[in-house]
Image: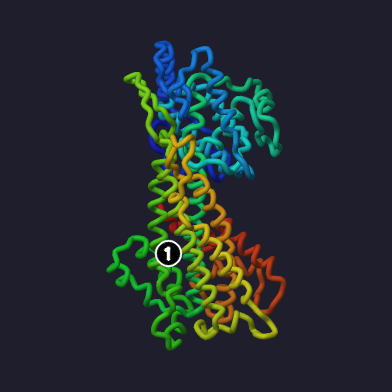
């Protein structure tokens, strides 16, 4: 099990990629431990002063003017957690829950949340022993933090609700007992610190980013195979053209496509087609995918900052014994990042479907109609393109920005919310759809190249050989679904990228 180190500094996205991909152990640095303790000591000092301070000895939201007696502070925090367990829908995936808990630990490690070390260590125990609270996916507007989902996470720490442990769903209370522990008893400020924060939205957005990066890189490889299948002209990828545009992503995509098709057996025949220009879906791949690459880079920058930012409220400044109430829990940066991801994902799919449609159109591609040897008797890839068109339409509908919507809450105290949580969650649904589109294009592109019979560049030939090892030629009709499922698996598991040995395609590299 990989160990990740969490401290008071900013972590890079590779750390969170590890948390998302597989179980991890967490090591808290000594400065982080001291910062957590110092912050908690400040809270204890403030409580002893008996001064009313929001989030410590007052009510919440519109009830913040209501003071709470010191003997009721534990009940105040527990009531807050339990009253917010109002989520609905399917449970969030295990890898999202694990990532969200790690992000919560990282936020607390900065030392501005006023929470006891014991609470952070219980979160560590959950992460390291693969104890995953059951968190319904719906119910957060992404402001005041991800209140409902984080309440379900927090409830497990105090023994309420259910968790997944060793492949079974069990009561949270029993998992504490199995480790010889009692559920946590929350003290002043701790329930609010647990509930406030953008960790669910951020975990979902990070997952979307990681998967979108994979899809982006896969689209370049698959698009390069399609370029060969339709005998696309190499001229459009000439470095001199793209240098004049000065767009970083465009230049990098053009360079990659140029390298992937260099010296293949398709290059000489491409000059004999009589075409002076290719359709945009071939010719403008660097411009379209390059723009997507730049958007993914922008999202990566935002989420790097957000991942272990301090996003609860109020915040404790131990050096001056101040507790300041602001709005770091508002997830607008994550909402915008998710909307940007959605646009890029949608466009990658739209371009892929257009390339697929081009290959099935014999008047443009020069390939047999619908890539079948006996058109009429066989329909070939006709319905594969129809299905891809349907899925592109779905992703276009989902790409509508979530961040522009607003439904005020809490008696208008929280009057402008981000909608980041479902905005980020829908990105993963769009990724699933994009995988299907890319899988269909991969099948068609390899079939198109096999119709030509020329030799691909070694990197692309490795992809073709990998697919053909499990999916025979598709020039005559047969049950299509198994071939598509296998192609989708190769796309989903990054096998296409591994076969092409093109790990440098990440927008962050």
Closer-to-camera residue (489/84): 84
Residue 509 shows in this picture: no
Residue 36 figure quarter: top left
> Residue 46: image x %, image y %?
40, 15
- Give the left or right position of residue 70, taking residue 240 as reference: right
Residue 237 shows in this picture: yes
**Looking at the image, which residue is at 58% across and 22% down?**
184
**Looking at the image, which residue is at 65% across and 63% down?**
486
Specify the quadrant that holds the N terminus: top right
Helix, strand or loop at mark 1: helix
- 397, above or below 61, in the image: below
Categorize mark 1 by other alpha carbons within 10 Å: few (<14), some (14-19), many (20+): many
Residue located farthest toward the front when viewing the structure as drawn: 411
Tell me the residue that label 1 is attached to: 289
Closer-to-camera residue (392/35): 392
- Give the left or right position of residue 121, taking residue 235 as reference: right
**Looking at the image, which residue is at 40% across and 72% down?**
284
> Residue 318: image x %, image y %?
36, 21
- 370, above or below 466, in the image: below
- 406, above or below 249, in the image: above
Closer-to-camera residue (38/200): 200
Query: Total number of numbered labels?
Result: 1
> Residue 82: image x %, image y %?
59, 28
């Amino acid at each position: 099990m990989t160990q990740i180190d969490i401290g008071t500094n900013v972590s890079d996205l590779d750390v969170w990629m590890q948390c998302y991909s597989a179980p991890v152990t967490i090591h808290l640095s000594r400065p982080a431990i001291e910062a957590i303790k110092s912050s908690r000591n400040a809270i204890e000092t403030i409580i002893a002063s008996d001064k009313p301070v929001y989030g410590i000895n007052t009510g919440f939201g519109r009830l913040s003017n209501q003071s709470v007696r010191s003997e009721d502070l534990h009940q105040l925090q527990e009531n807050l957690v339990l009253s917010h367990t109002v989520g609905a829908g399917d449970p969030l995936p295990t890898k999202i829950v694990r990532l969200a808990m790690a992000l919560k630990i990282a936020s607390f490690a900065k030392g501005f949340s006023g929470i006891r070390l014991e609470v952070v260590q219980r979160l560590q125990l959950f992460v390291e022993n693969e104890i995953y609270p059951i968190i319904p996916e719906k119910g957060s507007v992404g402001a005041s933090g991800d209140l409902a989902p984080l309440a379900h996470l927090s409830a497990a720490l105090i023994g309420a609700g259910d968790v997944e442990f060793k492949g079974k769903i069990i009561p949270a209370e029993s998992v504490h007992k199995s480790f010889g522990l009692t559920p946590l008893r929350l003290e002043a400020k701790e329930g609010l610190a647990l509930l406030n924060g953008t960790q669910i939205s951020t975990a979902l957005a990070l997952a979307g980013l990681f998967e979108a990066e994979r899809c982006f890189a896969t689209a370049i490889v698959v698009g390069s195979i399609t370029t060969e299948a339709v005998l696309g002209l190499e001229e459009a990828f000439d470095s001199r053209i793209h240098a004049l545009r000065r767009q970083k992503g465009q230049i990098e995509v053009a360079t990659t496509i140029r390298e992937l098709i260099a010296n293949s057996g398709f290059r000489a025949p491409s000059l004999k087609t009589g075409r002076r220009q290719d359709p945009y879906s071939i010719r403008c791949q660097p411009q379209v995918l390059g723009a997507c690459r730049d958007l993914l880079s922008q999202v990566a920058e935002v989420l790097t900052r957000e991942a272990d930012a301090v996003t609860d409220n109020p915040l404790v400044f131990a050096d001056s014994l101040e507790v300041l109430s602001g709005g770091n829990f508002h997830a607008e940066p994550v909402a915008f990042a998710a909307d940007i991801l959605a646009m890029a994902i949608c466009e990658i799919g739209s371009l892929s479907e257009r390339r697929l449609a081009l290959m099935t159109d014999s008047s443009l591609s020069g390939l047999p109609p619908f890539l079948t040897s006996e058109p009429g008797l066989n329909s070939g890839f006709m319905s594969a393109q129809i299905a891809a068109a349907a899925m592109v339409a779905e992703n276009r509908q989902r790409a509508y920005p979530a961040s522009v919507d607003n439904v005020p809450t809490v008696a208008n105290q929280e009057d402008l919310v981000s909608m980041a949580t479902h905005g980020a969650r829908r990105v993963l649904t769009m990724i699933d759809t994009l995988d299907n589109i890319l899988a269909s294009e991969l099948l068609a592109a390899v079939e198109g190249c096999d119709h030509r019979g020329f030799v691909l560049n070694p990197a692309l030939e490795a992809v073709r050989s990998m697919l053909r090892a499990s999916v025979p030629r598709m020039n005559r009709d047969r049950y299509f679904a198994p071939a598509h499922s296998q192609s989708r698996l190769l796309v989903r598991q990054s096998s296409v990228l591994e076969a092409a040995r093109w790990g440098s395609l990440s927008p962050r590299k």
